[in-house]
Image (cartoon, rainbow, N blue to C red):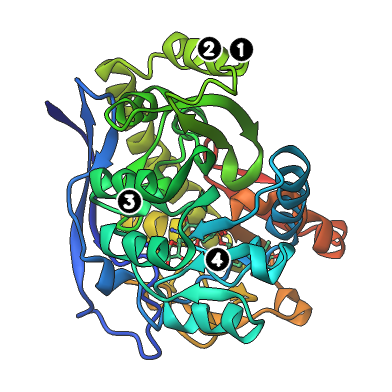
Amino acid sequence: MNKFFLNLGVQPLANNFLKKFSSKQPTYNLKLYFNTKTKMVSISKRIPSSVMFNSKYPYRSSMSSTMQSSFKQLSSEIKKKFNPKLLLEIGSNDGALLTHFDKDRAIGVEPCKNLAKITRAKRYYTYDDYWDLKLSSKIKKKFSEVDLIYSANTLTHISNLNEVFKSINLILSDEGVLIIEDPSLLECIKNNAYDQFYNEHIYVFSAIALKNLLKKFNLEIFDVKNLPTHGGSLRYFIKKKNNKTRNVKLSVKKQFDKEIKNGLDKFKTYKDFATKSTKSKKLFIEILNKIKNNNKRIIGYGATAKASTVLNYCNIDNKIIDYFVDTTPDKSNRFIPGKNIKIKKYKKTLLDNVDYIYLGAWNFKNEIFKKEKAFIDNGGKFITHVPSPRIINK
Ligand code: DWN
Ligand code: SAH
C-alpha cells in the first residue's frame, strides 16, 4: 500500500527552461509516497516520458569533470572486470560513458534526439528511442544479445519498471551483467535532500526496494558500491539468478543491514524526513531573507533540476537571487523553471561583486569550491540547504 509522507507543492517540470519567463507553464503537484509492501519510494504524478525527454532536453552529463572522471574510471573497471563483447547503455545522454568504449562494442539508447545526435556524430550506434520491449526486441534482432547493460540515473525516470526489467531480461545474455547507478535513498534521507524528488525522479531506489523488485524478474544484486556522486549514489551489480558463475558479495548484505538499521523499511523514517524537510524550508527562507535584509547580493550556481525543486518549494524568486550561472549551453539565457530568475552562461566575472552564492549543484561542491577558490579567498560565501540550510566557505 502506498502511504503519503511529503507534499513539495505545485512544481513546474524541473528541466523546463523557458526563454521568456511565463507564470503559465505546466505544473504538477509533487507528492511523495512509501509503499509499505515493496518498500519503494516514489512520486505520485506521472508525466509522460515524451513530455520530459524529447529533442529539447537540456541536461548534459559531461558538464562536470567529476562525472566525466567517474564515467572514465568505471569504463576501465568494466573492461578489466567484465571485458564485455557488447555493452548497451540505457540513457547514454551525450556519451560521457559510452565514448570510452570501442565503437563496435557499445550501443547507446538515448530518446532525446538532440543528445543521441552527439554520440551518433562520433559514430556510436545510438537508438533515439525510449527503452521498452519493442526497442529491446529490435536491438535483439540486430545484435542477438548483450553481455553488459549499464544505466545511470535513468531507470528511476521510467514509470513502468516491469517493462524496463522484462526488456533487460530479453536481451541480456545468461551470464551477462546489469549495472545500474542511481542516487541512494539512504544518503538522500541522511542529507535531507528532498530535492532529489521531482517529476523526472519517479523513484529513488533503496537496495531493499530494488532487491524486492528484481526478485520478480529472477534478477539479483551480487555487488554494491557506495559512490560520492550526485550527493551519494549506489552502483548495483546485478545478474540473472540462475547464473551461478558469480557469488553474491558481502557488500550486498552490508548495504541491506545499513538500510534496515536506518529504518528505510519503516514508514516512520519517511514521516521524520518530511518533518525535517519542512523545517529545512523554513530555515532556508530565513537565512536568505536575513542576507537580503543586509543588502547583500546573492546569485545561484548550477541551475540543476534539484535547485528548481527547492526554489519552487520555498518560493524564492529574483527578489532574493539575482541570477544563476551555469555552463550548460541549453540553459543559458533562459529562466529557472517556474521562477523569474535568469540563467547566465558561466563566466568568472559574473561572480564579481557577489556576496553569497546559492549552491544549486551542491552535489558538485568540491569541484565548484576548487574552481571558485578566488571568490572564497576574497571573502565570498556559499549557501547550501544540505544537510541543513547554512552558510559555508569550506
Ligand atoms: O538524474 C538526473 C541527473 C543525473 O541530472 C536528471 N534527472 C537531471 C539532472 O539532474 P540535475 O540537474 O540535478 O543534475 P546535476 O548533474 O546536479 O546538474 C549540475 C548542473 O550544474 C548542470 O546544469 C551543470 C552545472 N554546473 C556548472 O554550471 N558548473 C556544474 C558544475 C560542476 C560546474 O562547475
Ligand atoms: N545517464 C546519464 C544521464 C542521466 S539524465 C547520467 O547519468 O549522467 C536522464 C537520462 O535518462 C536522459 O538522458 C534521458 O533522456 C534518459 N531517459 C529518460 N527516459 C528514458 C527511457 N524511457 N529510455 C531511455 N532513456 C531514458
How far apart, in angstroms, are the residues tagged by discs 2 and 3?
A: 27 Å
Q: Helix or strand or loop: what does disc 2 sit on?
A: helix
Frontmost of labels 2 and 4 is 4
Compared with 298, 66 (above or below) is: above
Ligand 2 has an atom within 8 Å of the beta carbon of the residue at disc 4: no
Q: Which is more toward the observer, 182 or 166? A: 166
Number of callouts in the render?
4
The residue located at (64%, 81%) in the rendering is 123
Separation of residues labelled 2 and 4 (CA atoms)? 32 Å
Amino acid type of the residue tagged 4 in the rendering: Ile
Residue type beneath disc 3: Ser
Q: Where does the C terminus fall, quadrant-wise?
A: top right
Instruction: Specify whether residue 16 is in view.
Output: yes
Front residue of 265 and 252: 252
- Residue at image position (27%, 66%) is 49
Nearest to N terminus: mark 1 or mark 3: 3
Q: Which residue is mark 3?
A: 167
Counting residues from the N terminus, which is met first, the one under dot 2 or under dot 3?
A: 3
Q: Which residue is mark 1?
A: 250
The amino acid beneath tag 2 is Lys
Q: Could you say which disc has been placed on residue 253 in the image?
A: 2
Q: CA distance from mark 2 to mark 1?
A: 5 Å
CA distance separating discs 1 and 3 = 28 Å
Give the alpha-carbon distance from disc 4 to disc 3, as whole Å. Answer: 15 Å
- Circle 4 sits on which residue? 107
Answer few, some or many: residues within 10 Å of disc 4's Cα (few below 14, many 20 plus, some between 14 and 19).
many
Q: Quadrant of the N terminus?
A: top left
Give the crowd class for mark 3: few <14, some 14-19, many >=20 residues within 10 Å: some
Tell me, for residue 5, which label it has, or none: none
Q: Is there CB contact under 8 Å for labels 2 and 3?
A: no
